[in-house]
Amino acid sequence: MRDDKTLGAYNISDLREMALKRVPKGLFEFVDRGTEDEVALRNNRAVFERIRFKPRTLVDVSRRTQEITLFGQKQKMPICIAPTGTAGLMWHEGEIALARAAKDAGIPFTLATGSMTAMERVAEEAGGRLWFQLYMWPDKSMSHKLVERARAAGYEALVVTVDGAVSGNREYNLRNGFTIPFTFTRKNVTDVLMHPRWLFGVLAKYVMTTGMPRYENYPSEIKYKVTARPMGRSQMKNDSLNWEDLKVLRDMWPGTLIVKGIAHPQDAILAADCGADGVVVSNHGGRNLDGSMAPLEALPDVVDAVGKRIQVIVDSGFRRGSDVVKALALGAHAVLIGRATLYGVAAGGYAGATRAITLFREEIDRVMALLGARTVAEHGTELLHFADSAFRRPGSVRADLRLVETARAPAEAQR
Ligand SMILES: Cc1cc2nc3c(=O)[nH]c(=O)nc-3n(C[C@H](O)[C@H](O)[C@H](O)COP(=O)(O)O)c2cc1C
């Protein structure tokens, strides 16, 4: 591996190419692809092109900062790491690598229920601002045990994912034959043998230390009994989950409560009514309901509905700093990053994850300068051009107020 910190990757797409070479195809497709016809996956990216910048000029941006305050705490960048169950398959103990990279960058890391490293170990070995993502089992008491463990391990936020009543239809997983725990088929063994760096650097390391990778957060009564299922078709999903369950979690969890997987503004209101501190507008990176609207399209209505009561985070499809800046200008308080940092960790563990975060930092900084924005909070829709007149704009008071303020006090605004 190169010893310069760029790793030879100058954008997230470069990291994706490196990940593609390193990990078996079946695993790569699990990370990279969407569901069914991948309409949602494609639209998550395409939507960014419908929104363009309308930059201001001759603004003194020499002291610009991308620092934000999220759930009462300052953080250095407006991104957080999304929960991704397979981080630990991209790299040996990839969750720890990602959490360390997040800590060093001063941003939160979300550990997935279905991770390969136990939540207590991530807390001990990485530390930093840790959020725990919860999927519910049909036996809710088992999920509640996880909540208790997350509290005891010092996790700051509970992220309850609500957009997976059943598993998404990921046909390529069935074709590729990758399951957790691993079962061996001729097809996937060939795939693994063709990727020796992954075989020796990831799989063999688990086998020689803790055994075959498995869902380490699962309660012990089922951890060793989980039968192999195609990846993403685990037993966690619960199609009877409802708002009453969220209220129970609110009563149990003293920390920050975030509901992930919101598209409809009415659901955002219900989440706030249940006492959530934040929502993540998300279509799971195009991995669950194909044809669902891009979160960026859903964002303005959600911001209008709850943006003053709770914090609104968004994810799905973010690959560039400019994507992040567009979402913030539309009213998001922060952005979750899923695949981009996973590609990074697959490409080079801690160094690769750090590279992905650094790319976002540098790109956001450059865009802010070229856009004439000194702080993230002062972005508003007045800095955007909507190429598509159908795109819903937020009735963002924030943006309107700022325009008035700037008009009244240009000298003040320059400071
Ligand atoms: C490989 C992979 C595994 C994921 N696992 C989970 C998970 O266990 N829980 C969850 O809430 N979201 C999960 N997600 C969704 C992410 O948290 C996030 O919503 C999505 O990746 C955002 O889109 P992006 O990948 O385009 O950034 C996963 C995403 C990927 C790519």
Image (spheres, rainbow, N blue to C red):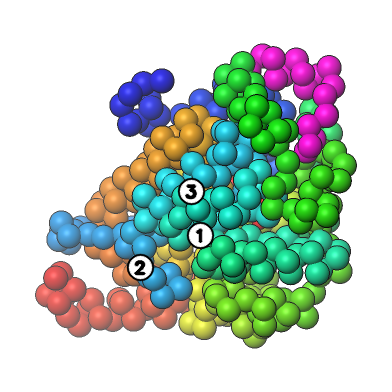
Residue at 76%, 56% (x, y): give it: 219
> Magenta segment, which residues?
179-195
Q: Residues within 10 Å of mark 2 (few under 14, many from 20)?
A: few
Asked whether 253 falls inside the magenta stretch, the response is no
Counting residues from the N terminus, which is met first, the one under dot 2 or under dot 3? 2
Q: Residues within 10 Å of mark 1 (few under 14, many from 20)?
A: many
Q: From the image, state whether disc 2 or disc 1 is nearer to you.
A: 1
Q: CA distance from mark 2 to mark 3?
A: 23 Å
Q: Residues within 10 Å of mark 3 (few under 14, many from 20)?
A: few
Q: Is residue 16 visible?
A: no
For the residues labelled 3 and 1, say whether their Cβ atoms are less than 8 Å apart.
no
Q: Amino acid at mark 2?
A: Lys
Q: CA distance from mark 2 to mark 1?
A: 14 Å
Q: Which residue is mark 2?
A: 74
Where residue 125 is drawn, which disc sits there?
3
Q: Amino acid at mark 1?
A: Leu
Residue at 73%, 66% (x, y): give it: 145
Q: Is 71 drawn above or below residue 79 in the view shown?
A: below
Q: Amino acid at mark 3?
A: Glu
Image location of residue 135, percent across then percent down: 73, 60
Residue at 82%, 45% (x, y): give it: 224
Question: Which SS class for mark 3?
Answer: helix
Which quadrant of the rendered structure holds the N terminus?
Answer: top left
Image location of residue 189, percent across then percent down: 77, 18
Where residue 366 is drawn, which disc sits there?
none
Q: Nearer the viewer, residue 406 or 145?
A: 145
Q: From the image, state whether disc 2 or disc 3 is nearer to you.
A: 3
Q: CA distance from mark 3 to mark 1?
A: 12 Å
Residue at 57%, 19% (x, y): give it: 197
Where residue 130 is drawn, which disc sits there?
1
